[in-house]
Amino acid sequence: MQNNASFLTVNRQSLFLVNTKSLVGAVLLGLVFVLVQQIAHRIDALINPASVIIGGVTWATFTGLIVLLYRQPAGLITAEVAAFTGLATGLSVLAPFFILANGAGSIVYSLVSWKLPMKSWGHHFLAQLATNLIGNLFVAIGLHVLLHLPTGVILIAAGITTTAGVIGGTILTKKIYESVYRAGLIN
């Protein structure tokens, strides 16, 4: 049985972790994620509604942390709890596209962190870069489909959100994950 599961293991990290701790943790962090996103998006709406800077950083950070702490399917559970709650609460006109962005972002972060040991700044940067590019691609599609914005405006808005998410997400995810690890809260 162990040989069948070995294909899932790279750098001693499993791509999947299905136990009560990870599933309950995913739901609980999903609820925290929802609360943080509700606040972050409202602050962003005051600053610049087209560029989701604070929401982008918190999205990137939570996406990375959930995957690093609980892997999959917890990453998808948390991502979609946040997306569907955003849709139900009218968080953004783009909320329907958060379903795709959150799910794809979680999967991409999982795949990158599965292949890399996630010990260096570069590993966290690459995971956030890939995650933010894919996630913000879906949001950019939403900007085009729902708001009919010009391509130049979409590229600028997506570029700002992606840059903020990559930088902020890399720093916060690495620092928080290392702190949780040093505290002995994860193996």
Image (cartoon, rainbow, N blue to C red):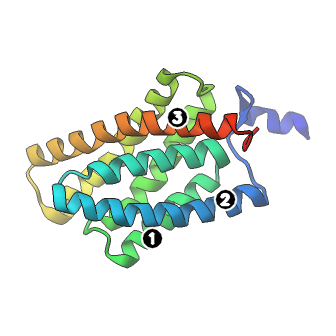
Residue carrying label 2: 25
Residue carrying label 3: 175
Which amino acid does the dot numbered 2 rest on?
Gly
Position of residue 51 measured from the top left corner of the image (x, y, whole percent): 20, 51
Mark toward the start of the polypeptide (2 vs 3): 2
Residue carrying label 1: 84
Position of residue 53 measured from the top left corner of the image (x, y, whole percent): 27, 48
Residue positioned 26% across, 52% down in the render: 52
Name the quadrant containing residue 68.
top right
Mark toward the start of the polypeptide (1 vs 2): 2
Which amino acid does the dot numbered 3 rest on?
Lys
Secondary structure of the residue carrying numbered label 1: helix
**Quadrant of the drawing holding the N terminus:** top right
Position of residue 147 measured from the top left corner of the image (x, y, whole percent): 15, 63
Which amino acid does the dot numbered 1 rest on?
Phe
Q: Which residue of the protein is positioned furthest toward the right in this rendering?
A: 1
Q: Residues within 10 Å of mark 2 (few under 14, many from 20)?
A: some
Asked if labels 1 and 3 touch by Cβ distance under 8 angstroms, the answer is no
Q: Mark 3 or mark 1, which is nearer to you?
A: 3
